Image: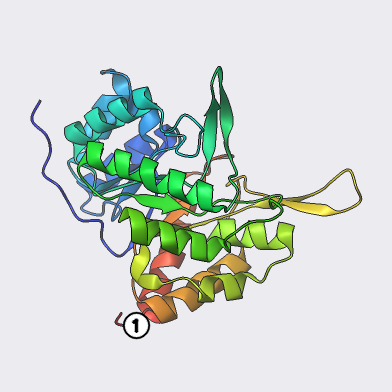
Amino acid sequence: MSPRPLRNLPQLAGFGLKPEHYADVLAAAERGAPPAWVEVHPQNYFGAGGPPHRWLAAIADHVPLSFHSVGLSLGSVDGVDRDELAALAALCERYQPAMVSDHLSWSNAPDDKFPDLLPVPYSHAALDHFVREVGRVQDRLRRPILIENPSRYLAFAGDDWDEVDFLHELCRRAGCGLLLDINNVEVSAFNLGLDPAAWLGAVDPALVGEVHVAGHSRKDDDMGGTIAIDDHGSPVHDSCWDLLAAFLRRAGSKPVLVEWDSDIPDYATLMGEVAKANALLASESVDA
């Protein structure tokens, strides 16, 4: 199979593609109204063939793809997962996604894999590690990638870097970009007592290659408090839309993704969220 031609990721709103919406996307394309772009977790397509690839190949004929990896485990002590990287590289050759991204996190221990994106300290040693491992991924994929800021529930004591400064320095030294997840900023700010607007105001828009918005939940914890949970299982909060609008006024247009990964809605509901993002892009963005 010949690799597909590389497409740019448009500065419009897309959404996270789920099997529930495969047929809807193709039906929309046949009507001449496909989504601007979709994002997938490449780990769901590491098999050699079968229905997932038949659907994805058909959709990729109509819309650009963004690959949002959840398995490289860049922050693990042993470094990037070599098997995951090899599979990701093969999938990139096959589909030529417009963007590839992963997370400022780790998931692998020497003898185990964890089904979560675990936090890292913002230390000089962690920064050196991430610069090296992101460089290894970019060399293998022959392209720059984006790194997403995490949702945090606790903070490490004695960090050497502020989170935004750590991300800026990582981008500068590794030559990568930033996937700015505004919902993650809001979740972390609630849990750690930070100001999300100030956090976003410190970000260099030139480094941002993609923006995510999503819903989250808040639950009472065992100590009489409340914690924000990054579950992507509800509409985007009004406060998240407000933060996106403020960022776009400063940054200009960016590709914006609506994430909805649990309690999956019908296609019309999802596209309503996409329409809200596109309305903000049209009304709030300025020339960067």
Q: Position of residue 49 (x, y in %)?
A: 26, 18
81 and 218: which is toward the camera = 81
Image quadrant in which the C terminus is located: bottom left
Disc tally is 1
Q: Is residue 47 above or below residue 28?
A: above
Let me know if residue 237 appears in the view.
yes
Image quadrant in which the N terminus is located: top left
Q: How is the image coloured?
A: rainbow
Q: Which residue appears at 22% of the width and 47% of the height? A: 143
Q: Which residue appears at 60% of the width and 44% of the height? A: 119
Q: Residue furthest right?
A: 224
123 and 134: which is toward the camera = 123
In the image, taking residue 198 as reference, residue 18 lies left or right, namely left
Disc 1 element = loop
Q: Position of residue 260 (x, y in %)?
A: 51, 46
Q: Position of residue 10 (x, y in %)?
A: 26, 61
Q: Label 1 belongs to which residue?
A: 286
In the image, taking residue 7 as reference, residue 80 lies left or right, namely right
Q: Which residue appears at 43% of the width and 64% of the height? A: 168
Let me know if residue 176 appears in the view.
no
| Residue 239 quadrant | bottom right
Q: Residue furthest left?
A: 2
In the image, taking residue 198 as reference, residue 128 lies left or right, namely left
Type of the residue with mark 1: Val
Q: Residues within 10 Å of mark 1 (few under 14, many from 20)?
A: few
Q: Position of residue 135 (x, y in %)?
A: 31, 45
| Residue 211 quadrant | bottom left
Q: Which residue appears at 57% of the width and 29% of the height? A: 115
